[in-house]
Amino acid sequence: MKTKKVTKAVFPVAGLGTRFLPATKSIPKEIMTLVDRPLIQYAIDEARAAGIKEFIFVTSRGKSALEDYFDNAPELESELRKKGKTDLLDVLKDTNMESGAIAYMRQTRPLGLGHAVWCARRLIGDEPFAVLLPDDVIAADKACLQQMVEAYEQTGGCMVAAMEVPPAKASSYGVLDIEEDMGSIVKAKGMVEKPKAEEAPSNLAVIGRYILTPKVLTNLNRMKQGAGGEIQLTDAIAEEVGGEGGVFGYRFRGMRYDCGSKAGFLQATVAFGLSRPDLNEEFSVYLNEIVAQQKAAQ
Ligand code: G1P
């Protein structure tokens, strides 16, 4: 299918991060680090791997640390250069953005995820775009969004990352109502945001990666309130079911960590710590010791 290339991505980063207070009193949640990289860096790396060239951040008050993070740091860089620390200069490269590649848009009122994406409408214009929720960190051999871009080239329409969750957990997610299950790609006949457990149409949950048509932005113009009184992205996507392109779920290959929760953040820290060649040995010895101690104490 002939689809337009996806080159723009929206990163909704306006949330208060109250689940991580007091840490998030003075630092944005997205700057919290897994090992030594902030959450937002994982999302940016994934978007880059998928061919994204323009990065649109929807921010709010108190998020200026994010802007500094993606700016050049001339003093730090010249100091490292003077000391010959080329390895550290290399590490910093991932944080540099070409001038004009990154834009910040403020969401002045917390009206929901759909509203946050709508705030970026003028920067998106009339083309398909990606949305990445940095709370969802996905470890994968091939970047999750890259997998989705490839699947989207077959289907067109709107595509959301999807994952089976235990039925009792479905009410924490957007949930897909399945029309046709083709394996990794699923055609949806509906989508519900945070359904009651007994009303969930399936246990296939939406994870924070989306490829959307600009029509979704038009749907958001109506500012319809959904679950929790918020303007929900899920609802605006669901309106495209049966529309021109349709809505698809994509079962990605990879491990998703819910870094919006403390337990998920800790799990990701352990997993990413273990996956680092420079830390693996020391860290796994330590973890084994802790487990042994816990067992002995039981
Ligand atoms: C958001 C979306 C929801 C999705 C989830 C994935 O919810 O509204 O549809 O399933 O992200 O992480 P939130 O977790 O922000 O409440």
Image (cartoon, rainbow, N blue to C red):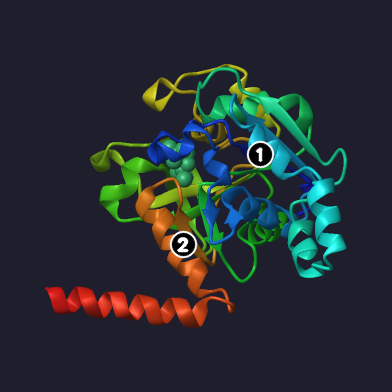
| Identity of the residue drawn at 69% across and 57% down | 45
The C terminus - image quarter: bottom left
For label 2, the crowd category at 10 Å Cα-Cα, with few meaning under 14, some 14 to 19 and many 20 or more, is some
| Identity of the residue drawn at 55% across and 18% down | 109
In space, the residues marked 1 and 2 are separated at their CA atoms by 21 Å
| Identity of the residue drawn at 77% across and 69% down | 87
Pinpoint residue 1: horizontal percent, then vertical percent.
Answer: 76, 54
Write down the residue under mark 2: 269
**Residue 66 shows which numbered tag?**
1
Q: Is residue 164 visible?
A: no
Pinpoint residue 124: horizontal percent, then vertical percent.
Answer: 76, 32
In the displayed structure, 67 sits above or below 207; it is above
Pinpoint residue 221: horizontal percent, then vertical percent.
Answer: 62, 18
**Judging from the image, what secondary structure is the residue with disc 1 in?**
helix
| Identity of the residue drawn at 46% across and 62% down | 269
- State the count of labels: 2
Occupied quadrant, residue 107:
top right
For label 1, the crowd category at 10 Å Cα-Cα, with few meaning under 14, some 14 to 19 and many 20 or more, is many
In the displayed structure, 187 sits above or below 193; it is below
